[in-house]
Amino acid sequence: MNEKTKNKLVKGIYVNREYSWLLFNKRVLDQARDLTNPLLERCKFLSIAGSNLDEFFMVRVGSLYNENLADPDETDNKTGLTAAKQLDGICDVTKEFYADRSSCFKQLSKELSKNGIRFLRAAHFTPRQKEECKAIFMSRILPLLSLMVLDAKHPLMQFENMRSYMLFDLEKNGRRMVGVMAINPALDRLYKIGGGENTRLVALEELVRAFGHHAFIGYTVNGKMMMRVTRNADFDTQIDDADLECDFSAIMKKKVESRARLNIVRLEIDNDDSRLKPFVLKMLKLNPKFCFKDEQFFDYKFLFSLDKFLPAERSAPLKYPPFKGAVAQELLGASMIDTVFDHDVFLSYPFDSMNPLVDLLDECATDKRVTSIKITIYRLANHSRIAEVLCKASENGKQVTVVIELCARFDEENNLYFANKLQEAGCTIIYGMENYKVHSKIISIVLKDGEKIRYITHLGTGNYNESTSKQYTDLNIITADQHIGEDASAFFNNIAICNTDFDYSCLLVAPKTLKAGLIKLIDREIEKAKEGKEGYILAKMNSLTDKSIIDKFVEASKAGVKLELIIRGICCLLPEVPGKTENIRVISIVGRFLEHSRVYCFGRKKDRVMYISSADLMTRNTDKRVEIAAPVYDPKIADEILKILELMLADNVKAKKLCADCVYRRVETLGEMVDAQAKLLKKDL
């Protein structure tokens, strides 16, 4: 990484948030080079890194774009950088990413070729291949392309977000014009040509580059350039809650549709055509620093489908071995309600299946003791069993309340669909809470057992999404604890009346008590260290950006508290800085599964206090969202969670350590190779 750029984005012990995220995405790209991953999985990591960057530009760069317009003098509270300076740094680092990604794809292409998959470029077509490819283009691709010529009558056009276009420098009767070919996203990305044992593939982009000029009959083509624009997706979701006439779902639908017309924050091109590039930049009114070149592809999503071009016996060794989340023997065929009344149930996704939770809801949908089910929904699977069970419960006369977050970025349309479906089934739908996003993961089940009111509560770190539960690591506790149940019931009542000013007996709930509660526990460890006792903090999260928490961690380190932090993504704190953060260790694990669980643990053994949470330690989570941190009361579950965290701390295969110079380095390997996720798959704790 360029040292000059890094020095601009790192100030003392603070790391700029956007820079830290770009470092995370580099670790994702590193997995595409990691030979401990099977070849086809490495291809997927390359694709994921690109998709991550697309979302980063739409959301984070879009946000900085808005900040720069609204208040150009506003600065980041940790590094003191204006939005404009942050954007400069982002552009510098991103150019390096494009070069790294292109280099990585070339290396993967060589390895794929050795395994029977070869990508062909037009420059290397044999005469027979050229003839076959032209026939594919003319018969299967050209009919689905849209054409336009920009001239005096058609001077401008609306380039759609994340859609590729081929531009042609045209000439006819001495007039220069620009031809635009819109590439239909419904087209296949890869086309197989020829026969034989080896698979020869030609990408859609390559076919358009090679034969697109045939569409402009009667014109001379002097140059061509493929392009794609990225538009700002960071729109304002706040509404005036005093307006009782408004339909929030209708407002959100309009806002989602507006994304196609928002400002452009990035231009991608495949070459530096001397006429077309400046023409496009001028037409888009875009600063050249937001223009990036990739001669190959703008997105690599097609790499997810390579296995379909190989026989199963050849593709299997190139992928991760298949697995299925386990279901504990005691839960097979048992009543989940009775089991939870007997003891707390712990589920660790994806190593454990989500089925027991769905089975619990299904049982509750018909159990006569159950009077109500209340749930928060942030993201659901496209085909959601949980949504089906909630509809079933409502149709069976249960009181079902669903707090569904319509502002879950990029899932707004999916959530609008499920909100309508659930409402039609008779569920009560609540769209969030004032202008706070409800990001909590909680289910409250109320049962009337004779004259006694009993509760079953589910508390988790991840979404109620059956698909991502197989890909993300998340922790879940299902408990019949009466005090937690009463808190959960109160939580949903407070959501219903938009009340954030409430003190719960067990749960820490943002925006009021979560941050304050965690800081109080950090202070407890600081006081122990000052008294000469051992102060210890072990935490796992996706991101750390909240300055007040960071400063409290620094205070703890200076007092002698040992802090071990497992942070997958953004970390705005530099560890191991002498005199400041030398007692803080930070590692990041990027592997087969997306690390998504959040755990906050203070003290050791009998002194230990542990919470699992939906919240990262980011200002948006602690101050601007409704989040929950739930105590882990069952000592057996707490011990199991601790074993998981200790296994991650011992990882020396997928873990990287953040050093004081803001470089992530491989963890030192001493003795046995430890891949935490692989061991958890084998239940090898």
Image: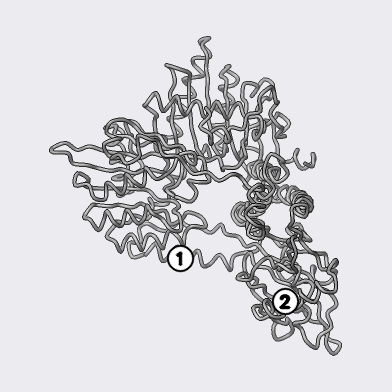
In which quadrant of the rendered image does the N terminus lie? top right
Which numbered disc covers residue 432? none
Please name whichever residue, 119 or 444, is drawn nearer the observer in this view of the structure.
119
Comparing labels 1 and 2, the label whose residue is closer to the camera: 2
Q: Which residue is denoted by mark 2 in the rendering? A: 137
Res 622 visible = no
Q: Give the x, y percent position of residue 439.
A: 44, 46
- At a point 39% along the width and 30% down the height, the residue shown is 631
> Is there a contact, CB below 8 Å, between mark 1 and mark 2?
no
Q: Secondary structure at mark 1?
A: helix
In this rendering, is residue 68 above or below 447? below
Outermost residue, top side: 532
Residue assigned mark 1 = 253
Q: Position of residue 550 (x, y in %)?
A: 57, 31
Q: Residue at x 46, y 45 (%)?
A: 624
Label 2 secondary element: helix
Q: Residue furthest bottom?
A: 173
In the image, 683 versus 534, the foreground residue is 683
Does residue 63 appear to the left or right of 210 in the view shown?
A: left
Q: Would residue 504 be seen by someone viewing this image from the given angle?
A: yes
User: Marks 1/2: CA distance?
Assistant: 37 Å
- Mark 1 belongs to which amino acid? Lys
